[in-house]
Image: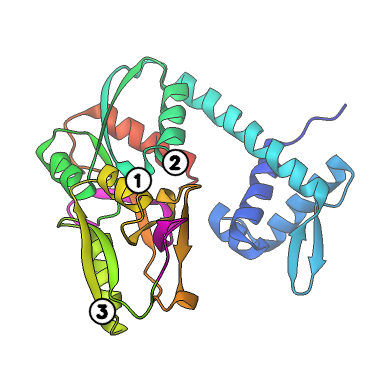
């Protein structure tokens, strides 16, 4: 039985993630013809077509979708094995700050990757509000932070961009003719700013129905049906729904979650862990 070439699988994943052979080539520092040759060789190895043309776009075939799942797992195991050997001496304490809203979405894969690659490292997690976590990072209370905020004095990269929605309880009844009852977190808050600016531009009246100091309070008020809250898609639960333009509400800007560290961090573990996570993102 032949063995799949991991380099071909890496190119295959890049093509899927970047939606074109040309963009995949740019990401991998290869020519488009080199990417095409890689895909031809991979299809020869597996004996099936991985892409099919639909209009002007190339879409994955069913075998292509199956291979994609296996390819991601194989490359993850390969990269974890290499990183584990390289970082086997990495030990100590790494303090990570994370906002509440992504503590069970973006954060767990990051923690899992660090734990697999550096099993001797002890992780300490501080879950709180994004602006306060950024202050903690500057003061050295944490070593790295996931945050929607930007800071030119820090070093970071984007982890994910998420849409921001108007979220309410599944049982909430929206009345466009009445001022919008808002569930807001107290300042400073990027979601509060996005919501109020969008409503002002659209000349939509609103009232503050509930004010909370953290996401736990926001979720409780939303589930209780007290009003509508502007949050990223990560907060949406099965007992909630989304209001949008068809309900008379304006579109809200997306938010990007970044991983930040101090450029001259005194903790060498933070730099190594940061590079480890950045490498896992293909950056």
Question: Which residue has dot 1 on it?
Answer: 101
What span is colored magenta in the figure?
Answer: 150-174
Vertical arrangement, residue 1 with respect to residue 34, above or below: above
Q: Residue 196, image x and y in percent?
A: 24, 72
Counting residues from the start of the chain, the first of labels 1 and 3 encountered is 1
Q: Residue at x 56, y 60 (%)?
A: 26
Q: Residue at x 64, y 44 (%)?
A: 10
Q: Is residue 45 magenta?
A: no
Question: Which residue has dot 2 on it?
Answer: 105
Counting residues from the start of the chain, the first of labels 2 and 3 encountered is 2
Tell which tag, 2 or 3, sits nearer the viewer.
3
The CA distance from mark 1 to mark 3 is 27 Å
Q: Is residue 169 magenta?
A: yes
- The picture quadrant where one finds residue 191 is bottom left
Label pair 1/2, CB-CB below 8 angstroms: yes
Label pair 2/3, CB-CB below 8 angstroms: no
The CA distance from mark 2 to mark 3 is 33 Å
Lateral position of residue 193 relative to residue 100, left or right: left
Question: Which residue has dot 3 on it?
Answer: 205
Describe the element under mark 1 as helix, strand or loop: helix
The CA distance from mark 1 to mark 2 is 8 Å
Lateral position of residue 22 relative to residue 27, left or right: right
183 or 150: nearer the viewer: 183
């Amino acid at each position: 039985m032949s063995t799949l070439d991991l380099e071909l699988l890496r190119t295959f994943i890049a093509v899927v993630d970047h939606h074109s052979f040309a963009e995949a080539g740019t990401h991998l520092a290869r020519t488009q013809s080199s990417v095409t040759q890689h895909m031809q060789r991979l299809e020869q190895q597996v004996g099936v077509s991985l892409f099919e043309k639909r209009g002007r776009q190339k879409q994955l075939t069913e075998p292509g979708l199956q291979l994609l799942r296996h390819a991601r797992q194989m490359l993850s195991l390969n990269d974890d094995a290499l990183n584990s050997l390289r970082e086997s001496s990495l030990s100590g304490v790494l303090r990570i700050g994370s906002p509440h809203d992504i503590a069970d979405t973006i954060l767990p894969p990051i923690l899992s990757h660090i734990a697999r690659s550096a099993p001797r490292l002890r992780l300490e997690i501080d879950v709180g509000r994004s602006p306060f976590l950024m202050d903690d990072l500057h003061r050295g209370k944490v070593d790295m932070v996931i945050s929607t905020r930007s800071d030119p004095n820090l070093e970071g990269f984007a982890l994910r961009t998420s849409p921001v929605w108007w979220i309410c309880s599944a049982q909430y009844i929206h009345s466009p003719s009445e001022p919008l009852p808002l569930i807001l977190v107290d300042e400073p808050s990027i979601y509060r700013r996005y919501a109020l600016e969008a409503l002002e531009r659209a000349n939509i009246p609103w009232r503050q129905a509930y004010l909370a100091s953290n996401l736990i309070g926001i979720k409780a008020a939303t589930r209780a049906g007290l009003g509508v809250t502007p949050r990223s898609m990560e907060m949406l639960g099965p007992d909630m729904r989304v209001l949008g333009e068809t309900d008379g509400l304006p579109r809200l800007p997306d938010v990007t979650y970044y991983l930040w560290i101090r450029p001259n961090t005194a903790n060498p573990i933070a730099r190594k862990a940061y590079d480890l996570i950045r490498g896992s993102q293909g950056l």
